[in-house]
Image: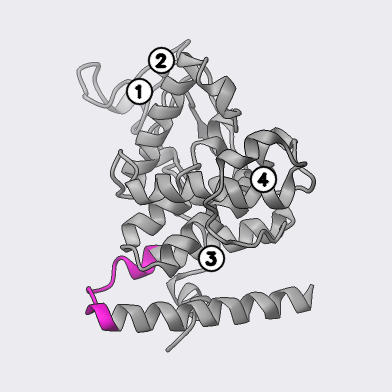
Amino acid sequence: MEGIDEQVRRSGEGGEADQPASGGYTTGKTLSLVGEGANDIGLDHPHMFASVRRCDFMQTFTGRKFWPIDPRPDEVNIDDIAHALSMLCRYSGHCLKFYSVAEHSVHVAQWLFDNGYPWETILAGLLHDATEAYVADVPRPLKQSLPTYKDAENKVWRAIAARYGLAVDLPAEVHEADNRILADEIQQNMKPMEWHSNHDDPLGVTLEFWPPAVAEHEFIKFFRFLDQRRREPAMSEIEARHDREASRADWEYQFRKEQEAT
């Protein structure tokens, strides 16, 4: 049984395909020609003009343009997501050690993986906070009072879900894991307070406090593993369980080897 690292290598080490160079997107202030040159087509050509984009764009890690108020699935990129989440600290930085959104996402997905949920559910767990790569991580109490932010976040999530073939509504199991991991995180990485007693059903994960480069690597590796496995023919329940056990053991072995090398 080949391990996650080998399967990732076979599926390709490069990132997603670059966005098409032809065609122009605009910031909403002007219209620009797309595709063919202006002298080659008539004014009635269906691709004569690009659509108007709302607001302005942001530059992403990979040098792409992304319109957070007017997101499109083809402009979402997993390398941008992994890098940005690895640089974002959970709880707006109000924790004892740096703990990235990327590591949090990997722990949620790993718990779903260990408990035998479908590949799509595990991938949804890995990407459940992917919107924060484009609209930042806003604390829950503040987010509830920002309807405009929530609207933008929902639009970005719809683009991400469409890009990776996920349902718009997150599975209940993802919500469960995301809520229960709060207990693990506050116990291991925050100063004690009374409200912590409201979170008494932890997942049982151990936070690793990965530096950004490690968190980014683990996030990308897990994504490519999941993306490949969900495209393969369905296994029987017994085969799937054995495969998960072997993959989990190999993942832990590879992670130990990488840690020893650093």
Q: CA distance from mark 2 to mark 4?
A: 49 Å
Display coloring? one colour
Look at 48% across and 10% down and name the residue there: 29
Proximity of marks 1 and 3: CB atoms separated by less than 8 Å: no
| Quarter occupied by residue 154 | top left
Distance of label 4 from label 3 (alpha carbons): 26 Å
Circle 2 sits on which residue? 31
Which residue position holds label 3? Answer: 221
Count the marks. Answer: 4
Which residue type does callout 1 highlight? Ala
Asked if labels 2 and 1 touch by Cβ distance under 8 angstroms, the answer is yes
Identify the element where label 2 is drawn: loop
Asked if the residue at tag 4 contacts the one at tag 2, i.e. Cβ–Cβ closer than 8 Å, the answer is no
Lower sequence index among marks 2 and 4: 2
Q: Amino acid at mark 4?
A: Ile
Label of residue 50 in the image:
1
Q: Residues within 10 Å of mark 2 (few under 14, many from 20)?
A: some
In contact (CB < 8 Å): disc 1 and disc 4 = no
User: Which residue bears the numbered disc 4?
Assistant: 186
Q: Quadrant of residue 140?
A: top right
Residue 202 lies, with reference to residue 140, above or below; the image says below
In front: mark 1 or mark 3? Answer: 3
Check if mark 3's residue and mark 2's residue have beta carbons within 8 Å: no
